[in-house]
Amino acid sequence: ATATATANDSEEKEKDKAKAQTSNTGDLIHIVATRCTAEGTLPTEYVHLAVPDRKLYLSGTGDLITALLLAHMDSVTDAASLATAVEQSVASVQAVIDRTLAAKRRELSIVQAREEIVSPKVVFKAVRRPIVLMKD
């Protein structure tokens, strides 16, 4: 029971940290994604996730999140699974950034963060929203 309580406390602290980071800074990076259900149709909802802008530049983070999202696309069947794919991709990139900064490296610590890439700890949650089309 103690191990479970400790794990839950740790998860709650991470969530509180994420909320504090988001609410204390006005500078956010926004990720928006949609999916079409059939050829020729328009999406009916989108997924939005915001993370604090760390105000740093690391070469390759855009390529990394693109590759991770692409890897998750096979499991995307609806907006809920798209939200999960975005959350996991962002969590993996955040873990790689954390590893890179901790190691004081210039190149992304992708290999060192492989466990976090395979099983990311989601801190920032995506929100599903309807797409409202404006009539002319």
Image (tube, grey):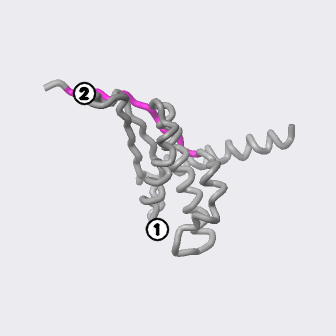
* Residue 104, x across and y down, in percent: 59, 74
Q: Is residue 131 above or below residue 2?
A: above
Residues at badges 2 and 1 in contact (C-beta under 8 Å)?
Answer: no
Q: Pinpoint residue 120: horizontal percent, then vertical percent.
A: 62, 49
- Report the residue at 52% width, 75% height from top: 106
Compare residues 96 and 19 and report the one nearer the observer: 96
Q: Which residue is mark 2?
A: 133
Q: Earlier in the sequence, mark 2 or mark 1?
A: 1
Report the span colored magenta.
123-134
| Dot 2: element | loop
Alpha-carbon neighbours of circle 1 within 10 Å: few (<14), some, or many (≥20)? few
The front one of 32 and 118 is 118
Instruction: Pick whichever, 84 or 135, lies toward us.
Output: 84
| Residue at 46%, 61% in the rendered image | 61
Label 2 environment density (alpha carbons within 10 Å; few <14, some 14–19, many ≥20): few
Q: Which residue is mark 1?
A: 58
Type of the residue with mark 2: Leu
